[in-house]
Image (cartoon, rainbow, N blue to C red):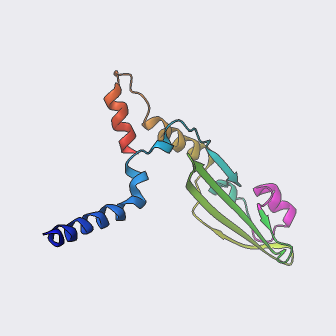
């Protein structure tokens, strides 16, 4: 009789243990209460309208004036600059972009990277929409609305 009960119990325990890796995604845990984590911007925030100002053949100082100082420059490869951007919200990376500039004979040869926001104004507008989407509506949201909001994260 114990063997018949042991096998289903082990199967159920295995299923529950498999879901432990994603439990923080769906259920708030004790460590998410009471601890405020800062939103962190790191690196170079580039937009497509700034990158559109680049032209093949520009000098390094001209590129630095347009894009700013690169986050990563290598002493071993002085013909490559890397612009990296990351944004973390509540301790989780929500946005990460890489953009690389290549020089040939100290002149801009080519560039490549991830898709960039169209402009800073557009990026600010979408960020405001994201942050205001979960805001209060002024229609008397109560305790149960707050509780549902926690479980929707």
In the displayed structure, would residue 7 be above or below residue 131? below
Q: Residue 86 in the image: state x and y as whole percent.
A: 63, 55
At x 59% / y 50%, what residue is drawn? 88
Q: Is residue 100 visible?
A: yes
At x 18% / y 72%, what residue is drawn? 3
> Is 67 on the left or on the right of 115, as rendered?
right
67 drawn magenta? yes
> Is 124 on the left or on the right of 60, as rendered?
left
In the displayed structure, would residue 44 be above or below residue 9? above
Please tell me which residue lies in front, 112 or 30: 30
Q: Residue 118 in the image: state x and y as whole percent.
A: 58, 53
At x 23% / y 65%, what residue is drawn? 9
Q: Which quarter of the picture shows residue 57? A: bottom right
In the displayed orientation, state which residue is furthest to the front. Answer: 1
In the displayed structure, would residue 78 be above or below residue 97? below
> Is 91 on the left or on the right of 33, as rendered?
right
Image quarter hosting the N terminus: bottom left
Q: Residue 79 in the image: state x and y as whole percent.
A: 82, 75
Magenta region: 55-71
Q: Is residue 52 visible?
A: no
65 drawn magenta? yes
Q: Which quarter of the picture shows residue 29? A: top left
Q: Residue 136 in the image: state x and y as whole percent.
A: 41, 28
Q: Which quarter of the picture shows residue 141? A: top left
Please tell me which residue lies in front, 45 or 134: 134
Please tell me which residue lies in front, 100 or 10: 10
Please tell me which residue lies in front, 22 or 41: 22
In the displayed structure, would residue 129 be above or below residue 91? above
At x 35% / y 63%, what residue is drawn? 17
Image quarter hosting the C terminus: top left
């Amino acid at each position: 009789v114990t063997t018949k009960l042991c096998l289903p119990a082990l199967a159920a325990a295995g299923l529950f243990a498999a879901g432990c890796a994603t439990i923080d995604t769906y259920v708030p845990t004790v460590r998410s209460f009471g601890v405020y984590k800062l939103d962190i911007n790191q690196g170079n925030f580039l937009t497509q309208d700034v990158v559109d100002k680049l032209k093949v053949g520009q000098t390094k100082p001209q590129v630095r004036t347009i894009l700013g100082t690169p986050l990563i420059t290598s002493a071993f490869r002085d013909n490559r600059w890397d612009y990296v951007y990351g944004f973390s919200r509540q301790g989780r990376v929500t946005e990460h972009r890489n953009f690389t500039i290549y020089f040939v004979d100290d002149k801009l040869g080519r560039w490549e990277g991830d898709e960039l926001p169209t402009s800073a104004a557009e990026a600010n507008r979408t960020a405001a929409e994201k942050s205001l989407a979960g805001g209060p509506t002024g229609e008397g949201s109560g305790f149960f609305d707050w509780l549902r909001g926690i479980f929707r994260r």
